[in-house]
Image: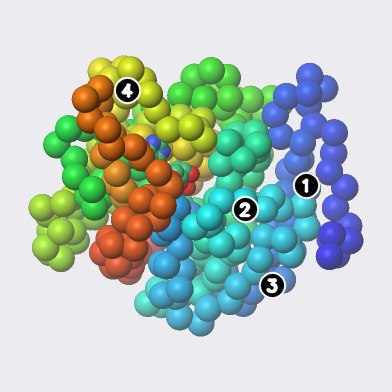
């Protein structure tokens, strides 16, 4: 299959940092993916752990496994099916990533985010990111939905930013601002829709902090994360959002709180991935409904 687009990956930065996919390499992948679907989506949705069900609700569904896309990474985590799903929500074409890439799988930040550049080259201008996250804010409950208003990119702050390495101006500027990473208008609309759906009691607005994982956090780490303003924590999302904003996409983010983060040495509850997937099943339908309504009602860019 790899020979289909005749892609040779270039050697990347001379300093050995950053993406080894050139603009042209990524464009070849984008053009190849477009040959596999009749949809021409302007909206992409990245489905977090256990949240891939949204892709199943698309009409006119077409699927493309990551392993069948030349030079595309593959998913290795339970709850991440590892395929692109194309289809429609109402009359709008969308593409879903049913499974994302995480740094703890061994992928560098730029590779976790590489599908976002492929999407951009396919014509996508609005990115929805979803994830499963632990609730650090003591007022949060399992099953809450949190609209992401901002993030703390812990790996990025330690130079594991997806934009490290040579900058190609065709994607964006060397030093992109991240002050309004998450689109205010979309968040406002999401609040209105959620209230109309009767979701007000479990809808939150908060700050997502990304950690590298795969180990869950110590109690001391959790206390520190709360002190610096974290509402929810996870192991993804920031590389995708930074890359999307760099290339000028509008971003909407939502976390499903799948577990509470225990911050008391006397409490013997421990987080685990099975619990994360189980909670996904419990609330995923509401999350899907909210995203479907938002896609239908939002203005096109
Ligand atoms: O892909 P997301 O961020 O939804 O996955 C979360 C973080 C870890 O991959 C996993 C932990 O259970 O779920």
Callout 3: SS: loop
Q: Badge 2 local density, few (<14 within 10 Å), some, or many (20+)? A: many
Query: Of label 4 and label 2, which has the lower sequence position?
Result: 2
**Which residue has dot 1 on it?**
24
Establish if 88 lies above or below 112. below
Q: CA distance from mark 2 to mark 1?
A: 24 Å
Establish if 22 lies above or below 4. above
**Which residue has dot 3 on it?**
36
Q: Badge 4 local density, few (<14 within 10 Å), some, or many (20+)? A: some
Residue situated in front as seen by the camera: 109 or 246: 109
Coloring scheme used: rainbow
Q: Residue drawn 70% across and 29% down?
A: 18
Which mark is nearer the camera, 4 or 2? Answer: 4
Which mark is nearer the camera, 1 or 4? Answer: 4
Badge number at residue 75: 2
**Which residue has dot 4 on it?**
219
Q: Badge 3 local density, few (<14 within 10 Å), some, or many (20+)? A: few
Q: Is residue 32 left or right of residue 229?
A: right
Q: Is residue 296 left or right of residue 214?
A: left
Q: Is residue 212 left or right of residue 231?
A: right
Determine the residue located farthest toward the bottom in the rendered image.
60
Q: CA distance from mark 3 to mark 2?
A: 20 Å
């Amino acid at each position: 299959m790899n020979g289909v687009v005749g892609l040779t990956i270039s050697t990347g930065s001379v300093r050995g940092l950053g993406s080894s996919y050139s603009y042209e390499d990524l464009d070849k992948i984008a053009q190849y993916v477009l040959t596999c679907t009749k949809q021409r989506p302007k909206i992409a949705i990245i489905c977090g752990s256990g949240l891939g069900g949204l892709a199943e609700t698309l009409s006119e569904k077409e699927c493309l496994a990551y392993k069948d896309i030349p030079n595309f990474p593959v998913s290795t985590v339970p709850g991440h099916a590892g395929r692109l799903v194309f289809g429609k929500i109402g009359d709008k074409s969308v593409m879903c990533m049913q499974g994302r890439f995480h740094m703890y799988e061994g992928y560098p930040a730029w590779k976790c985010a590489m599908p976002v550049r492929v999407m951009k080259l396919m014509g996508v201008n609005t990115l929805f990111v979803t994830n499963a996250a632990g609730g650090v804010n003591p007022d949060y409950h399992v099953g809450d939905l949190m609209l992401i208003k901002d993030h703390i990119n812990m790996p990025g702050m330690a130079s594991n930013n997806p934009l490290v390495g040579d900058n190609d101006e065709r994607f964006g500027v060397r030093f992109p601002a991240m002050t309004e990473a998450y689109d205010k208008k979309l968040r406002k609309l999401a609040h209105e829709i959620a209230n109309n759906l009767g979701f007000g009691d479990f809808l939150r607005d908060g700050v997502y902090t990304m950690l590298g994982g795969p180990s869950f956090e110590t109690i001391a780490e959790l206390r520190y994360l709360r002190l610096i303003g974290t509402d929810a924590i996870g192991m993804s999302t920031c590389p995708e959002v930074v890359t999307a904003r760099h290339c000028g996409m509008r971003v909407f983010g939502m976390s499903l709180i799948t577990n509470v983060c225990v911050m008391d040495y006397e409490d013997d509850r421990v987080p685990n991935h099975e619990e994360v997937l189980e909670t996904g099943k419990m609330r995923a339908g509401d999350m899907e409904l909210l995203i479907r309504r938002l896609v239908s009602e939002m203005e096109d860019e």
